Structures are given as C-alpha cells and as structure tokens.
Image (cartoon, rainbow, N blue to C red):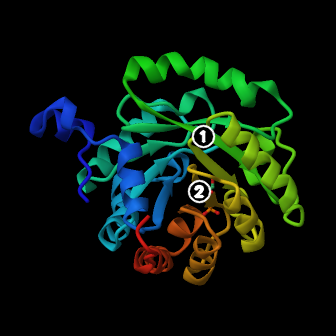
Amino acid sequence: MKYLSKERVKKRVKPEERISVHEYVKKKLMMGEKLHLTLIDPDKIISTKELHELASPLAEAGTDAFLIGGSVGISEHEIDGVIKALRTYGLPIILFPGNVTGISRLADAILFMSLLNSDSPYYIIEAPVLGAPLVYRYGLEPLPTAYIIVGYGGAAGFVGKARPIPYTKPDIGVAYVLAARYLGKKYIYLEAGSGAPEPIPSEFVSKASMVKGDTVLIVGGGIRTPEKAVEILKAGADAIVTGTIVEESPERAVSIVKAVKNLKSEPK
Ligand code: 1GP
C-alpha cells in the first residue's frame, strides 16, 4: 500500500480521498501484516548524507514509517531538516516527541502521548496540553497514545520521571494496558528505553496483548536481532520500533525489517 504524504496528497488526490496515517496502520494490520517503525533521533544525526545512508536501505527493505524524536537536545529546526530529507522515501513521518519542542509542522502525524506511569503531572497531562494547540495549528494527525515505561527505561524513563514496571511484573503492565484502553487510547507503546540491555520479555508482551482490544500495541527498546523482533511480534505486538541498532549496524537493522515484513498472520 502506497502512503501519500501531505505534500503529495495536495498535488494528486482530493482531500476526501486522503489516507490518514491511522488508516494506513490499521489497513496493514487488517491485511495480517506486522509493522516495523524506524526511529530517527535528530540529535544523533550528523549530516544529511549520513541520514540517507541509514534511511535508504531501511525504506528499501520495507520499513513502514519513520518515527522522529528523542528525549534530550531536540529542536524543531533539526526535526524539520530530518523530515525534509526523509520525504523522498514516501513513507509516513510520525513525531515521537520527548517534550513540546519535538513538534514540527512538516510531519504527517504525532504519537500524541501521555506517559501513564510518570510520577510527574507534566508528562501525564501538562506537556500534552501545552503541545495540543501546536498540533491543531500545524494540522498534524494526532494518534492518541498511552506511553508506558517498562524495565530499564533509559533516557525516556529518567527524563519522564517514570516509575518503570519491572519486567517480572506483567500483571501491572496488564492493568496499565486496560486503563489505557478504557481511557480511549488507540495506541499503546510499551517502552523499555532506547538502548535497553534487554527488550521487554515476550511473556510480558503476550499478557499485555491479551487485553489490548482494538488498540495498536507498539513495543520498543533494546530490540537488536531479527529473532527478538519476531518473538515479540509473535507474542502479540502489532509493531516494533528500532532506533539504536539503526545507528549501530544498518545491516542488522535491515535484517530486522525483512524478518518483520516476512511475518504474515491471517488477515483480520
Ligand atoms: C526508543 O523504543 C525506542 O524510544 C527504540 O529503542 O533505540 O533501543 O531501538 P532502541
């Protein structure tokens, strides 16, 4: 399925025929696909040339969308530069903001997040409130997301003042997933933290997926091999995110994308 970005849509199809990012995701899942999302942290990109060296093989291998964001040192100016360069691949560009500074008018959509297990009201509701008028003004598609930090937590856990759920306590994860559903979230992102030594255990994902209902379950943090990616998706995740491995070993990242795109379940 071809995704038409905002710019291309304006030129080629009528507004009523535009495919939203949410529809794009749901259609793929309905067809029995699992999704691979490539995380690009603008703070870690040195040049446009380097960005293309990372992104081009992943787009060719079939990654489904780009997530743009990071926890520290993000400015709208740098995000804009990354988005302009990534437009050439014709994939949805989704913001994954660590704070209000992570919002760019050039993106297609935004994971509009509440960090549910933060101890700080700022990350649960104040940052979303401060960002909402920008999302509205920029015409970004909001993807209502419960962000839940598990285990290691990394920079997102530290900055977000999270109380990470231990890997050995999936029942607490289940409670959060249910709460997210009942609050009307459409996406649930279980986050181990960027560069986590170990990803979220598949038993944890499996229990969470049993109660996820119609929500899209995204899992990220510490996924470095095709085997782990496949294990987590088979446990019930709808999408996985890889970031660190994209920077460390683009070849390995490509093998993860290929493994994910080879996974086909029965269409729903
Ligand atoms: C981080 O879940 C993402 O927010 C991706 O994690 O960098 O460990 O792949 P990695």
Circles 2 and 1 in contact, beta carbons < 8 Å = yes
Can I make out residue 82 in this image? no
Picture quarter with ligand 1: bottom right
Residue type, label 2 = Ile
Q: Give the side of residue 249 with respect to residue 116, left or right.
A: left
Horizontal and vertical percent position of residue 9: 19, 38
Check disc 2 and report its element: helix, strand or loop: strand
Query: Which of the 4 image quadrants contains residue 168?
Result: bottom right
**Which residue is under mark 1?**
145
Q: Which mark is on residue 218?
A: 2
| In front of the other: 76 or 140 | 140
Residue drawn at the location 42% of the way across and 68% of the way down: 33
Q: Residue furthest left?
A: 12
Above-or-below relation of 207 to 78: below
Mark seen at residue 89: none
Total number of numbered discs in the rendering: 2
The mark that comes first in sequence, 2 or 1, is 1
Determine the secondary structure under disc 1.
Answer: strand
The response on whether ligand 1 sits within 8 Å of label 2 is: no
| Residue shown at 59% from the left, 75% from the top | 234
Residue 103 place in picture, x, y as percent: 49, 30
Q: Is residue 138 above or below residue 187?
A: above
Residue at 42% x, 37% y is: 109
